[in-house]
Image (cartoon, rainbow, N blue to C red):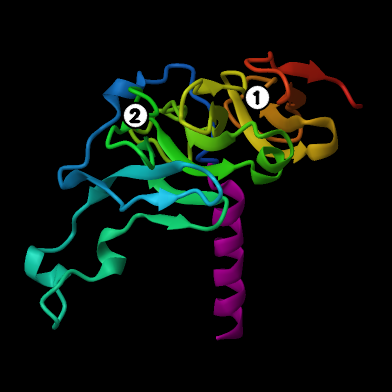
Amino acid sequence: MKNYIIFLVIIISFIACTKRDNRKVVNDTKDVSEVKKESKTVAIADLPFVIDSTTYMIHPIGNYTTHKSRSEYIGSSGSYTSDNISFTNFSKNRISGSISNVKFQHIDSNELKSLTKNILKIHSMNFLRDLYKKTENGYFVYNLTDKDTNADGDLDYNDLETLYISSLNGTGFRKLSPNGQDLVTWKTILEANKLYFKTIEDIDGNGEFDKKDKMHYFYLDLSVPNSKVIEYDPI
């Protein structure tokens, strides 16, 4: 029995060591419009979130995948259970989930304006509240996927993550991180009014990210509208 357990541990270790990296970059990637559609997905919106101390509401839009019949979604009370229909989480400064688009609405208007017409998957959007308090310039920073970089037919966490930014009302939505680079992390330095981020590039072209690849460092001046992303070398 002891020998069997040892043999099993060796097999599991071998499988773990040889498991392929799902975040690899495939050169012959499909256009994002060709990403496969789930047969049971429907576009739905969560109820709006009010961004505290601002005049805007946020309506997250998602592609919800159904796995049950209508009767299975309804509890004993005869109403839908909230945990089955919602697809986002909201905190004071952050909205996260599986979001395909966002619509913005001024609290004094009935008009809803879409963030984008592109196909993408927003993992999170963060309101830069401290900067807003200091400068009254409102920004959202987005962690998202905009390309099926591993060519598996899905936009998900196995594809490269990119960094985007928009104004408080959703205008000026643009990409900050370069194509072909995976976002590692980002942060704001309030004292300098700058957004800093770093990415990793598959510099050796082996289709996977490892220690042989190159790290890139960037900053964006948030005190200047539509400022350019600057790459710098801290090493």
Residue positioned 57% across, 78% down in the render: 5
Count of all numbered marks drawn on residues in the image: 2
Q: Dividing the picture into quarters, in which one does residue 43 lie?
A: top left
Q: Residue type at mark 2?
A: Ser
Point out the residue furthest to the bottom here. 1
Q: Earlier in the sequence, mark 1 or mark 2?
A: 2
In-front residue for pair 225/164: 225
Residue 199 versus residue 98 in the image, above or below: above
- Relative placement, left or right, of 180 versus 106 is right
Label placed on residue 26: none
- Relative placement, left or right, of 142 versus 40 is right
Q: Main secondary structure of the magenta part?
A: helix
Q: Position of residue 32 (x, y in %)?
A: 35, 23
Residue labelled with disc 1: 202
Q: Position of residue 153 (x, y in %)?
A: 33, 32
Residue labelled with disc 2: 114
Q: Dividing the picture into quarters, in which one does residue 213 lie?
A: top right
In-front residue for pair 164/190: 190
Question: How many other residues sit within 10 Å of disc 1, few (<14), some (14-19) or many (≥20)?
Answer: many
Residue positioned 28% across, 23% down in the render: 34
Q: Is residue 24 magenta?
A: no
- Relative placement, left or right, of 195 versus 119 is right
Residue 229 versus residue 5 in the image, above or below: above
